[in-house]
Image (spheres, rainbow, N blue to C red):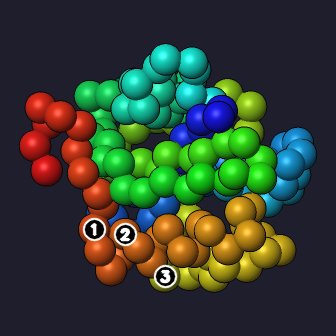
Amino acid sequence: MQGYNCIMIYGKSGKELLFCKRTKDPYKGKYNLVGGKIEQGEDGFCAAYRELYEETGILREQVTLKHMMDFTYYNQGCYVEVYVGRLQEKVTLREEKHPLVFLELEKEDFFSLERFAGEGNIGHMIEQVRDYGEGIAEEGQGV
């Protein structure tokens, strides 16, 4: 199965979340979380930090990612690992392909299928973080 990651990056205050605005299909014109492909044999945390840097310029030293949940899509032959992190400092974003923007958590309906990718999964993931926390840290980083 092909692996992908989806990375939720909260601003330092925890009141905003980083999105990219898709410039191509799938989900062209909609907001999506950053992420990408996990290479064959690549550790999930390493893949998440690599994709985060490639797509945003955010360094591993600027955020600690936690593994929150996974989705397995048997009918599509893939799985998605979801990581969550909060920026430790102000960063300068560097866009790879899609424009990047922080959206305020209190001002958006993240279940909106017109504005957001993922058939409501983004709203679900945000509620999971709010209700149950950010997940587990990489081994050796503490929780």
Label 3 sits on what residue type?
Glu
Could you tell me which residue is drawn at 66 percent across and 79 percent down?
111
Does 140 appear above or below 90?
A: above
Residue in front for this viewpoint, 104 or 52: 52
Q: Mark 1 and mark 3: span between their CA atoms?
A: 17 Å
Residue 140 in sight here: yes
* Residue neighbourhood size for the residue with mark 1, other residues' Cα within 10 Å, grouped as few (<14), some (14–19), many (≥20): few
Which badge, 1 or 3, comes first in the chain's sequence?
3
The residue that label 1 is drawn on is 133
Instruction: Please state the horizontal and vertical placement of residue 38, each as a whole percent of the image.
Output: 56, 28
Label 1 sits on what residue type?
Gly
* Residue neighbourhood size for the residue with mark 2, other residues' Cα within 10 Å, grouped as few (<14), some (14–19), many (≥20): some
Instruction: Please state the horizontal and vertical placement of residue 90, each as a whole percent of the image.
Output: 34, 43
Could you tell me which residue is drawn at 41 percent across and 73 percent down?
128
Label 2 sits on what residue type?
Val
- Marking on residue 106: 3
- Marking on residue 60: none
Helix, strand or loop at label 3? It is helix
Helix, strand or loop at label 1? It is loop
Q: Mark 2 and mark 3: span between their CA atoms?
A: 14 Å
What is the quadrant of the N terminus in the image?
top right
- Marking on residue 129: 2
Residue in front for this viewpoint, 96 or 66: 66
Which badge, 2 or 3, comes first in the chain's sequence?
3
Of all residues, the one furthest to the front in this rendering is: 74
Could you tell me which residue is drawn at 47 percent across and 20 percent down?
42
Q: In which image quadrant can residue 116 be found?
A: bottom right
